[in-house]
Amino acid sequence: MGEIKLLDCTLRDGGYVNDWNFGHNNLVSVFERMVDANIDIIEIGFLDDRRPFDINRSIMPDTDSVEKIYGGLDRKQAMVVGMIDYGTCKLENIKPCSESFLDGIRVIFKKHLRKDALAYCAEIKKLGYKVFAQLVSVTTYEDDEMMDLIRLANEVKPYAVSMVDTYGLMHQENLKHYFDLLNEHLAPEIGIGYHGHNNFQMGYANCIEMASQKTDREMLVDGSVYGMGKSAGNAPIELVAMHLNDCFGKDYHISQILEAIDANIMDFYKPATWGYNMFFFIAALNNCHPNYVSDLMNKRTLSVKAINQILGKLEGDKKLLYDKNYLENLYLEYQNVDVDDTADMAELTKAFAGRNVLLLGPGMNVEKQKDRIESYVKENDPIIVSINFVSELFKPDYIFLSNAKRYVQLATELLQKGDEFKVIATSNVTKTSGKFDYTLKYATLLDENAEIIDNSFIMLLKVMIRLGVKKVALGGFDGYMGDRRKNYVNPNMEYKFSKKQAESLNEYVCTVLKTLSDELEMEFITDSLYAE
Protein backbone atom coordinates (compact mmCIF):
# COMPACT_ATOMS: atom_id res chain seq x y z
CA MET A 1 0.00 0.00 0.00
CA GLY A 2 1.35 3.40 -0.97
CA GLU A 3 1.84 6.14 1.60
CA ILE A 4 -1.02 8.58 2.26
CA LYS A 5 0.01 12.18 2.84
CA LEU A 6 -2.13 14.98 4.22
CA LEU A 7 -1.85 18.45 2.67
CA ASP A 8 -3.06 21.62 4.38
CA CYS A 9 -4.26 24.36 1.99
CA THR A 10 -5.66 26.83 4.54
CA LEU A 11 -3.33 29.70 3.72
CA ARG A 12 -3.99 29.32 -0.01
CA ASP A 13 -7.60 28.20 -0.53
CA GLY A 14 -8.72 29.93 2.65
CA GLY A 15 -7.50 33.16 1.13
CA TYR A 16 -10.50 33.29 -1.18
CA VAL A 17 -12.51 34.19 1.91
CA ASN A 18 -10.40 37.18 3.04
CA ASP A 19 -8.45 38.11 -0.09
CA TRP A 20 -5.47 36.31 1.49
CA ASN A 21 -5.22 39.02 4.16
CA PHE A 22 -4.57 36.79 7.16
CA GLY A 23 -2.11 39.17 8.78
CA HIS A 24 1.53 38.23 9.22
CA ASN A 25 1.06 36.91 12.74
CA ASN A 26 -1.67 34.53 11.60
CA LEU A 27 0.35 33.38 8.58
CA VAL A 28 3.25 32.46 10.84
CA SER A 29 1.03 30.97 13.54
CA VAL A 30 -1.01 28.75 11.20
CA PHE A 31 2.16 27.53 9.51
CA GLU A 32 3.78 26.67 12.85
CA ARG A 33 0.60 24.95 14.07
CA MET A 34 0.51 22.76 10.96
CA VAL A 35 4.19 21.90 11.39
CA ASP A 36 3.59 20.93 15.02
CA ALA A 37 0.50 18.94 14.00
CA ASN A 38 2.80 16.78 11.82
CA ILE A 39 0.96 17.71 8.61
CA ASP A 40 2.96 16.24 5.73
CA ILE A 41 2.60 19.05 3.18
CA ILE A 42 1.81 22.71 3.93
CA GLU A 43 0.67 25.04 1.17
CA ILE A 44 1.58 28.60 2.11
CA GLY A 45 -0.29 30.58 -0.55
CA PHE A 46 -0.41 31.67 -4.18
CA LEU A 47 2.42 32.88 -6.40
CA ASP A 48 0.82 35.54 -8.59
CA ASP A 49 2.97 38.25 -10.15
CA ARG A 50 -0.08 40.47 -10.72
CA ARG A 51 -0.21 41.16 -7.00
CA PRO A 52 2.22 43.42 -5.09
CA PHE A 53 4.10 42.09 -2.10
CA ASP A 54 2.24 42.45 1.19
CA ILE A 55 3.70 40.82 4.28
CA ASN A 56 0.17 40.31 5.62
CA ARG A 57 -1.13 38.38 2.60
CA SER A 58 -0.50 34.84 1.40
CA ILE A 59 -0.62 35.83 -2.27
CA MET A 60 2.87 36.77 -3.42
CA PRO A 61 4.44 37.99 -6.67
CA ASP A 62 7.55 35.78 -6.55
CA THR A 63 9.48 33.22 -4.54
CA ASP A 64 11.55 35.95 -2.88
CA SER A 65 8.34 37.14 -1.23
CA VAL A 66 7.81 33.69 0.27
CA GLU A 67 11.16 34.05 1.98
CA LYS A 68 10.22 37.49 3.32
CA ILE A 69 7.06 36.11 4.97
CA TYR A 70 8.09 32.62 6.08
CA GLY A 71 11.89 32.68 5.98
CA GLY A 72 13.53 31.48 9.17
CA LEU A 73 10.56 29.38 10.29
CA ASP A 74 11.30 25.78 11.24
CA ARG A 75 9.51 23.45 8.83
CA LYS A 76 10.78 20.30 10.58
CA GLN A 77 9.55 17.31 8.56
CA ALA A 78 6.97 19.18 6.47
CA MET A 79 7.15 19.69 2.72
CA VAL A 80 6.34 23.33 1.87
CA VAL A 81 4.55 24.17 -1.38
CA GLY A 82 2.99 27.14 -3.11
CA MET A 83 0.40 27.28 -5.87
CA ILE A 84 0.32 28.96 -9.28
CA ASP A 85 -2.80 29.43 -11.36
CA TYR A 86 -1.29 28.76 -14.79
CA GLY A 87 -0.61 32.01 -16.61
CA THR A 88 -0.34 34.23 -13.52
CA CYS A 89 3.34 33.87 -12.61
CA LYS A 90 6.21 34.17 -15.09
CA LEU A 91 9.13 31.79 -14.78
CA GLU A 92 11.54 34.66 -14.13
CA ASN A 93 9.73 35.25 -10.83
CA ILE A 94 10.53 31.72 -9.66
CA LYS A 95 14.07 31.21 -8.35
CA PRO A 96 15.64 27.73 -8.34
CA CYS A 97 14.41 25.49 -5.53
CA SER A 98 17.86 25.59 -3.93
CA GLU A 99 17.37 29.34 -3.37
CA SER A 100 13.75 29.14 -2.25
CA PHE A 101 11.81 28.39 0.93
CA LEU A 102 9.52 26.21 -1.20
CA ASP A 103 10.03 22.51 -1.83
CA GLY A 104 7.29 22.24 -4.43
CA ILE A 105 4.82 24.16 -6.58
CA ARG A 106 1.29 23.11 -7.45
CA VAL A 107 0.01 24.35 -10.82
CA ILE A 108 -3.74 24.57 -11.38
CA PHE A 109 -5.09 24.70 -14.91
CA LYS A 110 -8.32 24.25 -16.83
CA LYS A 111 -8.81 21.35 -19.20
CA HIS A 112 -8.30 23.28 -22.45
CA LEU A 113 -4.92 24.58 -21.20
CA ARG A 114 -3.51 21.19 -20.23
CA LYS A 115 -0.84 20.97 -22.94
CA ASP A 116 0.68 24.39 -22.26
CA ALA A 117 0.29 23.99 -18.50
CA LEU A 118 2.17 20.68 -18.45
CA ALA A 119 4.96 22.27 -20.48
CA TYR A 120 5.10 24.99 -17.81
CA CYS A 121 5.22 22.30 -15.12
CA ALA A 122 8.23 20.79 -16.90
CA GLU A 123 10.06 24.12 -16.68
CA ILE A 124 9.32 24.42 -12.96
CA LYS A 125 10.59 20.88 -12.46
CA LYS A 126 13.86 21.87 -14.16
CA LEU A 127 14.27 24.49 -11.42
CA GLY A 128 14.44 21.65 -8.90
CA TYR A 129 10.91 21.80 -7.48
CA LYS A 130 8.53 18.96 -6.87
CA VAL A 131 5.75 19.94 -9.26
CA PHE A 132 2.09 19.01 -8.88
CA ALA A 133 -0.38 19.06 -11.79
CA GLN A 134 -3.77 20.16 -10.43
CA LEU A 135 -6.70 19.32 -12.72
CA VAL A 136 -9.27 22.11 -12.24
CA SER A 137 -12.91 21.00 -12.62
CA VAL A 138 -11.85 17.39 -13.04
CA THR A 139 -15.49 16.38 -13.56
CA THR A 140 -15.44 18.12 -16.97
CA TYR A 141 -12.89 15.62 -18.32
CA GLU A 142 -14.18 12.97 -20.70
CA ASP A 143 -12.23 9.71 -20.59
CA ASP A 144 -10.35 10.45 -23.82
CA GLU A 145 -9.39 13.89 -22.49
CA MET A 146 -8.16 12.33 -19.26
CA MET A 147 -6.08 9.84 -21.24
CA ASP A 148 -4.53 12.73 -23.14
CA LEU A 149 -3.73 14.45 -19.84
CA ILE A 150 -2.15 11.24 -18.56
CA ARG A 151 -0.01 11.01 -21.71
CA LEU A 152 1.25 14.55 -21.15
CA ALA A 153 1.85 13.91 -17.44
CA ASN A 154 3.84 10.75 -18.14
CA GLU A 155 6.17 12.82 -20.32
CA VAL A 156 6.71 15.45 -17.61
CA LYS A 157 6.57 13.10 -14.62
CA PRO A 158 5.29 15.54 -11.97
CA TYR A 159 5.46 14.61 -8.31
CA ALA A 160 1.68 14.12 -8.37
CA VAL A 161 -1.45 14.65 -10.43
CA SER A 162 -4.42 15.84 -8.35
CA MET A 163 -8.13 15.69 -9.03
CA VAL A 164 -9.56 19.12 -8.18
CA ASP A 165 -13.32 19.02 -7.64
CA THR A 166 -13.62 22.79 -8.05
CA TYR A 167 -17.38 23.02 -7.64
CA GLY A 168 -17.92 20.11 -5.27
CA LEU A 169 -19.72 17.88 -7.79
CA MET A 170 -18.05 14.54 -7.12
CA HIS A 171 -19.52 11.56 -5.35
CA GLN A 172 -17.57 8.44 -4.51
CA GLU A 173 -18.34 6.70 -7.79
CA ASN A 174 -17.02 9.70 -9.77
CA LEU A 175 -13.88 9.87 -7.68
CA LYS A 176 -13.24 6.16 -8.08
CA HIS A 177 -13.71 6.35 -11.85
CA TYR A 178 -11.12 9.10 -12.28
CA PHE A 179 -8.81 7.52 -9.71
CA ASP A 180 -8.88 4.19 -11.54
CA LEU A 181 -8.01 5.87 -14.85
CA LEU A 182 -5.10 7.72 -13.27
CA ASN A 183 -3.91 4.76 -11.22
CA GLU A 184 -3.95 2.38 -14.18
CA HIS A 185 -2.22 4.63 -16.69
CA LEU A 186 0.03 7.12 -14.85
CA ALA A 187 3.70 6.25 -14.49
CA PRO A 188 4.14 4.44 -11.14
CA GLU A 189 6.35 7.15 -9.61
CA ILE A 190 3.61 9.80 -9.98
CA GLY A 191 1.35 10.29 -6.97
CA ILE A 192 -2.40 10.90 -7.13
CA GLY A 193 -4.13 13.60 -5.13
CA TYR A 194 -7.65 14.80 -4.34
CA HIS A 195 -8.85 18.32 -3.50
CA GLY A 196 -12.56 18.63 -2.73
CA HIS A 197 -15.20 21.22 -2.00
CA ASN A 198 -18.33 20.85 0.09
CA ASN A 199 -21.19 21.88 -2.20
CA PHE A 200 -22.69 18.41 -1.71
CA GLN A 201 -21.07 17.86 1.72
CA MET A 202 -18.82 15.31 0.03
CA GLY A 203 -15.37 16.75 0.75
CA TYR A 204 -14.68 14.66 3.85
CA ALA A 205 -16.51 11.60 2.53
CA ASN A 206 -14.45 11.67 -0.66
CA CYS A 207 -11.23 11.99 1.35
CA ILE A 208 -12.20 8.79 3.16
CA GLU A 209 -12.97 7.13 -0.18
CA MET A 210 -9.65 8.32 -1.59
CA ALA A 211 -7.71 6.95 1.37
CA SER A 212 -9.39 3.56 0.95
CA GLN A 213 -8.12 3.02 -2.60
CA LYS A 214 -5.67 0.17 -3.07
CA THR A 215 -2.51 1.29 -4.81
CA ASP A 216 1.25 1.14 -4.44
CA ARG A 217 1.71 4.78 -5.39
CA GLU A 218 1.70 7.80 -3.08
CA MET A 219 -1.69 9.39 -2.41
CA LEU A 220 -2.41 12.95 -1.29
CA VAL A 221 -5.56 14.34 0.29
CA ASP A 222 -6.16 18.05 0.84
CA GLY A 223 -7.89 19.71 3.74
CA SER A 224 -8.03 23.10 5.40
CA VAL A 225 -8.44 24.23 8.98
CA TYR A 226 -12.17 24.27 9.82
CA GLY A 227 -12.83 23.73 6.11
CA MET A 228 -11.85 27.34 5.33
CA GLY A 229 -11.92 27.86 1.59
CA LYS A 230 -13.53 28.98 -1.61
CA SER A 231 -17.32 28.77 -2.00
CA ALA A 232 -18.66 25.88 0.08
CA GLY A 233 -15.29 25.32 1.70
CA ASN A 234 -12.94 22.35 1.80
CA ALA A 235 -12.74 19.10 3.69
CA PRO A 236 -11.94 20.07 7.31
CA ILE A 237 -8.38 18.93 7.86
CA GLU A 238 -9.10 18.14 11.51
CA LEU A 239 -11.64 15.51 10.40
CA VAL A 240 -9.36 14.02 7.75
CA ALA A 241 -6.46 13.91 10.23
CA MET A 242 -8.68 12.16 12.78
CA HIS A 243 -9.70 9.53 10.22
CA LEU A 244 -6.13 8.89 9.11
CA ASN A 245 -5.03 8.57 12.74
CA ASP A 246 -7.82 6.11 13.53
CA CYS A 247 -7.67 3.98 10.39
CA PHE A 248 -4.15 4.31 8.99
CA GLY A 249 -1.96 4.65 12.06
CA LYS A 250 -1.02 8.27 11.45
CA ASP A 251 0.11 10.58 14.23
CA TYR A 252 -1.37 13.97 13.41
CA HIS A 253 -1.78 16.18 16.49
CA ILE A 254 -5.42 17.25 16.35
CA SER A 255 -5.04 19.59 19.32
CA GLN A 256 -2.70 21.83 17.31
CA ILE A 257 -5.29 22.12 14.54
CA LEU A 258 -8.00 22.93 17.08
CA GLU A 259 -5.78 25.66 18.51
CA ALA A 260 -5.46 27.11 15.00
CA ILE A 261 -9.25 27.10 14.62
CA ASP A 262 -9.71 28.93 17.89
CA ALA A 263 -6.81 31.36 17.73
CA ASN A 264 -6.46 32.05 14.00
CA ILE A 265 -9.47 31.05 11.94
CA MET A 266 -12.65 31.86 13.87
CA ASP A 267 -12.12 35.61 13.48
CA PHE A 268 -12.40 35.13 9.71
CA TYR A 269 -15.38 32.77 9.94
CA LYS A 270 -17.71 35.20 11.69
CA PRO A 271 -17.83 37.94 9.02
CA ALA A 272 -17.50 35.61 6.01
CA THR A 273 -19.10 32.26 6.72
CA TRP A 274 -18.05 29.46 4.39
CA GLY A 275 -19.29 25.89 4.14
CA TYR A 276 -22.32 24.06 2.86
CA ASN A 277 -25.32 26.24 2.05
CA MET A 278 -28.22 26.39 -0.38
CA PHE A 279 -26.43 28.73 -2.79
CA PHE A 280 -23.55 26.35 -3.47
CA PHE A 281 -25.86 23.34 -3.39
CA ILE A 282 -27.89 24.87 -6.25
CA ALA A 283 -24.70 25.45 -8.24
CA ALA A 284 -23.56 21.87 -7.72
CA LEU A 285 -27.04 20.46 -8.36
CA ASN A 286 -27.02 22.11 -11.78
CA ASN A 287 -23.36 21.33 -12.44
CA CYS A 288 -22.71 25.00 -13.12
CA HIS A 289 -20.50 27.94 -12.22
CA PRO A 290 -21.63 29.61 -8.96
CA ASN A 291 -21.72 33.02 -10.65
CA TYR A 292 -24.79 31.90 -12.59
CA VAL A 293 -26.60 31.26 -9.32
CA SER A 294 -25.54 34.55 -7.77
CA ASP A 295 -26.59 36.50 -10.87
CA LEU A 296 -30.08 35.01 -10.81
CA MET A 297 -30.47 35.39 -7.05
CA ASN A 298 -29.34 39.00 -7.22
CA LYS A 299 -32.17 39.79 -9.61
CA ARG A 300 -34.46 39.24 -6.61
CA THR A 301 -37.36 38.40 -8.89
CA LEU A 302 -37.14 34.61 -9.08
CA SER A 303 -38.24 31.77 -6.89
CA VAL A 304 -35.69 29.02 -6.23
CA LYS A 305 -37.75 26.77 -8.49
CA ALA A 306 -37.47 29.30 -11.32
CA ILE A 307 -33.72 29.64 -10.76
CA ASN A 308 -33.32 25.88 -11.05
CA GLN A 309 -35.38 25.84 -14.23
CA ILE A 310 -33.22 28.51 -15.85
CA LEU A 311 -29.99 26.81 -14.76
CA GLY A 312 -31.33 23.60 -16.25
CA LYS A 313 -31.18 25.27 -19.67
CA LEU A 314 -27.39 25.78 -19.50
CA GLU A 315 -25.67 23.65 -22.10
CA GLY A 316 -22.29 21.98 -22.57
CA ASP A 317 -19.13 23.83 -21.66
CA LYS A 318 -21.17 26.96 -20.89
CA LYS A 319 -22.16 25.35 -17.60
CA LEU A 320 -18.76 25.83 -15.98
CA LEU A 321 -17.32 28.51 -18.26
CA TYR A 322 -19.25 31.50 -16.95
CA ASP A 323 -20.88 33.71 -19.60
CA LYS A 324 -23.00 36.57 -18.23
CA ASN A 325 -24.59 37.48 -21.57
CA TYR A 326 -25.54 33.86 -22.22
CA LEU A 327 -27.30 33.70 -18.86
CA GLU A 328 -29.07 37.00 -19.45
CA ASN A 329 -30.54 35.65 -22.68
CA LEU A 330 -31.76 32.54 -20.87
CA TYR A 331 -33.32 34.73 -18.18
CA LEU A 332 -35.19 36.86 -20.71
CA GLU A 333 -36.29 33.77 -22.60
CA TYR A 334 -37.64 32.25 -19.37
CA GLN A 335 -39.40 35.41 -18.23
CA ASN A 336 -40.86 36.28 -21.59
CA VAL A 337 -43.99 34.15 -21.45
CA ASP A 338 -45.90 35.28 -24.51
CA VAL A 339 -49.50 36.33 -23.90
CA ASP A 340 -52.06 38.37 -25.74
CA ASP A 341 -52.97 41.10 -23.25
CA THR A 342 -55.18 43.09 -25.63
CA ALA A 343 -58.46 42.26 -23.88
CA ASP A 344 -57.05 42.78 -20.38
CA MET A 345 -55.51 46.11 -21.36
CA ALA A 346 -58.80 47.26 -22.86
CA GLU A 347 -60.73 46.36 -19.72
CA LEU A 348 -58.21 48.09 -17.45
CA THR A 349 -58.14 51.18 -19.68
CA LYS A 350 -61.89 51.47 -19.27
CA ALA A 351 -61.68 50.97 -15.49
CA PHE A 352 -59.00 53.66 -15.03
CA ALA A 353 -60.49 56.20 -17.44
CA GLY A 354 -61.12 59.57 -15.77
CA ARG A 355 -60.09 58.35 -12.32
CA ASN A 356 -57.46 59.64 -9.94
CA VAL A 357 -54.80 56.99 -9.33
CA LEU A 358 -52.70 56.35 -6.24
CA LEU A 359 -49.79 53.93 -6.53
CA LEU A 360 -48.60 52.49 -3.22
CA GLY A 361 -45.06 51.21 -2.80
CA PRO A 362 -43.89 49.09 0.15
CA GLY A 363 -41.60 51.73 1.67
CA MET A 364 -41.54 52.66 5.35
CA ASN A 365 -43.22 56.01 4.70
CA VAL A 366 -46.53 54.28 4.03
CA GLU A 367 -46.72 53.98 7.82
CA LYS A 368 -44.63 56.95 8.90
CA GLN A 369 -46.56 59.43 6.75
CA LYS A 370 -49.91 57.69 6.59
CA ASP A 371 -51.72 60.93 7.41
CA ARG A 372 -50.65 62.37 4.07
CA ILE A 373 -51.97 59.36 2.23
CA GLU A 374 -55.21 59.41 4.22
CA SER A 375 -55.76 63.07 3.28
CA TYR A 376 -55.12 62.36 -0.39
CA VAL A 377 -57.49 59.40 -0.41
CA LYS A 378 -60.22 61.38 1.37
CA GLU A 379 -59.95 64.31 -1.04
CA ASN A 380 -59.46 62.44 -4.33
CA ASP A 381 -61.18 59.03 -4.02
CA PRO A 382 -58.50 57.37 -6.14
CA ILE A 383 -58.08 53.90 -7.54
CA ILE A 384 -55.37 52.42 -5.30
CA VAL A 385 -52.81 50.10 -6.86
CA SER A 386 -50.41 48.41 -4.44
CA ILE A 387 -47.16 47.09 -5.87
CA ASN A 388 -46.05 43.60 -4.83
CA PHE A 389 -47.56 43.92 -1.35
CA VAL A 390 -50.90 44.27 0.44
CA SER A 391 -51.09 47.36 2.63
CA GLU A 392 -52.65 46.87 6.06
CA LEU A 393 -53.54 50.57 6.25
CA PHE A 394 -55.04 51.26 2.85
CA LYS A 395 -57.31 48.83 1.08
CA PRO A 396 -56.09 48.45 -2.50
CA ASP A 397 -58.32 48.04 -5.52
CA TYR A 398 -55.56 46.28 -7.42
CA ILE A 399 -52.32 44.49 -6.59
CA PHE A 400 -49.60 44.73 -9.23
CA LEU A 401 -47.46 41.57 -9.26
CA SER A 402 -44.32 41.47 -11.40
CA ASN A 403 -42.12 39.27 -9.27
CA ALA A 404 -42.47 35.52 -8.72
CA LYS A 405 -40.68 35.72 -5.39
CA ARG A 406 -43.08 38.37 -4.10
CA TYR A 407 -46.01 36.24 -5.28
CA VAL A 408 -44.80 33.43 -3.01
CA GLN A 409 -44.50 35.86 -0.09
CA LEU A 410 -48.08 37.06 -0.69
CA ALA A 411 -49.61 33.59 -0.97
CA THR A 412 -51.45 33.68 2.37
CA GLU A 413 -52.84 37.20 1.92
CA LEU A 414 -53.96 36.44 -1.61
CA LEU A 415 -55.78 33.39 -0.31
CA GLN A 416 -57.43 35.20 2.62
CA LYS A 417 -58.15 38.57 0.99
CA GLY A 418 -58.23 37.71 -2.69
CA ASP A 419 -61.87 38.73 -3.07
CA GLU A 420 -61.13 42.27 -1.77
CA PHE A 421 -58.99 43.34 -4.74
CA LYS A 422 -58.01 42.29 -8.24
CA VAL A 423 -54.55 41.18 -9.31
CA ILE A 424 -52.69 42.62 -12.29
CA ALA A 425 -49.77 40.28 -12.95
CA THR A 426 -47.03 40.29 -15.55
CA SER A 427 -46.75 37.17 -17.67
CA ASN A 428 -43.54 35.95 -15.98
CA VAL A 429 -45.51 35.27 -12.77
CA THR A 430 -47.38 31.98 -12.90
CA LYS A 431 -50.41 31.47 -10.68
CA THR A 432 -50.43 28.32 -8.58
CA SER A 433 -53.84 27.41 -9.96
CA GLY A 434 -56.22 29.15 -12.32
CA LYS A 435 -55.55 32.61 -13.75
CA PHE A 436 -54.93 36.08 -12.40
CA ASP A 437 -57.60 38.71 -12.99
CA TYR A 438 -55.36 40.42 -15.52
CA THR A 439 -52.12 39.28 -17.14
CA LEU A 440 -49.92 41.75 -19.01
CA LYS A 441 -47.11 40.95 -21.39
CA TYR A 442 -43.85 41.10 -19.43
CA ALA A 443 -41.59 41.87 -22.41
CA THR A 444 -43.38 45.12 -23.27
CA LEU A 445 -42.62 46.58 -19.84
CA LEU A 446 -38.87 45.94 -19.67
CA ASP A 447 -36.02 48.40 -19.79
CA GLU A 448 -33.50 46.22 -21.61
CA ASN A 449 -30.72 48.80 -21.41
CA ALA A 450 -30.81 48.91 -17.61
CA GLU A 451 -28.77 46.87 -15.15
CA ILE A 452 -32.06 45.77 -13.59
CA ILE A 453 -34.34 45.39 -16.58
CA ASP A 454 -37.51 44.64 -14.64
CA ASN A 455 -37.79 47.16 -11.81
CA SER A 456 -41.37 46.77 -10.56
CA PHE A 457 -41.97 50.49 -9.96
CA ILE A 458 -40.86 51.43 -13.48
CA MET A 459 -42.91 48.61 -14.97
CA LEU A 460 -46.06 49.81 -13.20
CA LEU A 461 -45.53 53.37 -14.42
CA LYS A 462 -45.28 52.02 -17.95
CA VAL A 463 -48.56 50.18 -17.41
CA MET A 464 -50.19 53.45 -16.36
CA ILE A 465 -48.98 55.15 -19.53
CA ARG A 466 -50.33 52.30 -21.66
CA LEU A 467 -53.69 52.63 -19.90
CA GLY A 468 -53.87 56.30 -20.83
CA VAL A 469 -53.47 57.56 -17.26
CA LYS A 470 -52.10 61.12 -17.30
CA LYS A 471 -51.27 61.63 -13.61
CA VAL A 472 -50.50 59.40 -10.63
CA ALA A 473 -49.97 60.08 -6.95
CA LEU A 474 -47.15 58.10 -5.35
CA GLY A 475 -46.89 56.92 -1.75
CA GLY A 476 -44.35 54.61 -0.16
CA PHE A 477 -41.74 54.86 -2.91
CA ASP A 478 -39.04 55.93 -0.49
CA GLY A 479 -35.96 54.97 -2.50
CA TYR A 480 -33.33 52.47 -1.44
CA MET A 481 -31.21 52.84 1.68
CA GLY A 482 -28.00 50.84 1.97
CA ASP A 483 -25.99 49.54 4.91
CA ARG A 484 -28.77 47.48 6.53
CA ARG A 485 -31.25 50.32 6.91
CA LYS A 486 -34.86 49.29 6.56
CA ASN A 487 -36.35 49.75 3.10
CA TYR A 488 -39.73 48.02 3.45
CA VAL A 489 -42.75 48.35 5.68
CA ASN A 490 -42.96 44.54 5.61
CA PRO A 491 -39.70 43.10 7.05
CA ASN A 492 -40.16 39.91 5.02
CA MET A 493 -39.53 41.95 1.88
CA GLU A 494 -36.10 43.18 2.95
CA TYR A 495 -33.05 42.70 0.75
CA LYS A 496 -29.44 43.42 1.62
CA PHE A 497 -28.13 46.46 -0.21
CA SER A 498 -24.73 48.08 0.03
CA LYS A 499 -24.70 51.85 0.04
CA LYS A 500 -23.21 51.81 -3.46
CA GLN A 501 -25.93 49.48 -4.77
CA ALA A 502 -28.65 51.63 -3.22
CA GLU A 503 -27.24 54.79 -4.76
CA SER A 504 -27.03 53.12 -8.17
CA LEU A 505 -30.65 51.94 -8.00
CA ASN A 506 -31.87 55.37 -6.91
CA GLU A 507 -29.94 57.07 -9.69
CA TYR A 508 -31.44 54.70 -12.25
CA VAL A 509 -35.02 55.27 -11.07
CA CYS A 510 -34.57 59.05 -11.01
CA THR A 511 -33.27 59.00 -14.57
CA VAL A 512 -36.22 56.96 -15.81
CA LEU A 513 -38.75 59.13 -13.96
CA LYS A 514 -37.44 62.17 -15.81
CA THR A 515 -37.83 60.34 -19.10
CA LEU A 516 -41.39 59.21 -18.31
CA SER A 517 -42.46 62.63 -17.02
CA ASP A 518 -43.21 63.77 -20.57
CA GLU A 519 -46.04 61.24 -20.70
CA LEU A 520 -47.05 60.87 -17.06
CA GLU A 521 -47.29 63.50 -14.33
CA MET A 522 -46.11 62.15 -10.97
CA GLU A 523 -46.86 63.63 -7.54
CA PHE A 524 -45.06 62.22 -4.49
CA ILE A 525 -47.44 62.19 -1.52
CA THR A 526 -44.80 60.82 0.85
CA ASP A 527 -41.12 61.71 1.05
CA SER A 528 -38.92 60.01 -1.51
CA LEU A 529 -35.29 60.03 -2.55
CA TYR A 530 -36.61 60.01 -6.10
CA ALA A 531 -38.18 63.44 -5.60
CA GLU A 532 -35.04 65.12 -4.32
Image: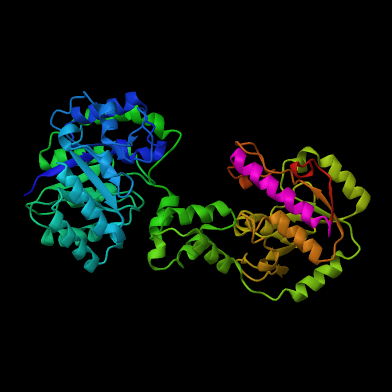
Asked if residue 208 can be seen in this view, the reply is no
Which residue is pictured at 70% across the width and 76% down the height? 340
The part of the image, by quadrant, that contains residue 53 is top left
For the rendered model, the colour scheme is: rainbow
Q: Main secondary structure of the magenta part?
A: helix
* Whether residue 313 is situated above or below residue 87 in the rendered picture: below
Query: Residue 132 location, x and y as percent?
Result: 20, 47
Q: Is residue 507 magenta?
A: yes
Number of numbered markers: 0
Which residue is pictured at 64% across the width and 45% down the height? 504
Query: Residue 531 location, x and y as percent?
Result: 79, 43
Which residue is pictured at 88% across the width and 66% down the height? 353
The part of the chain drawn in magenta is: 498-520
* Image side of residue 247 versus residue 239, left or right: left
Quarter of the figure that contains the C terminus: top right
Q: Is residue 65 magenta?
A: no
* Image side of residue 471 versus residue 21, left or right: right
Query: Residue 112 location, x and y as percent?
Result: 31, 61
* Image side of residue 194 versus residue 249, left or right: right
Query: Residue 526 location, x and y as percent?
Result: 81, 42
Q: Considering depth in this image, is 126 or 129 the residue closer to the camera? A: 126
* Image side of residue 185 versus residue 406, left or right: left
Which residue is pictured at 15% across the width and 42% down the height? 5
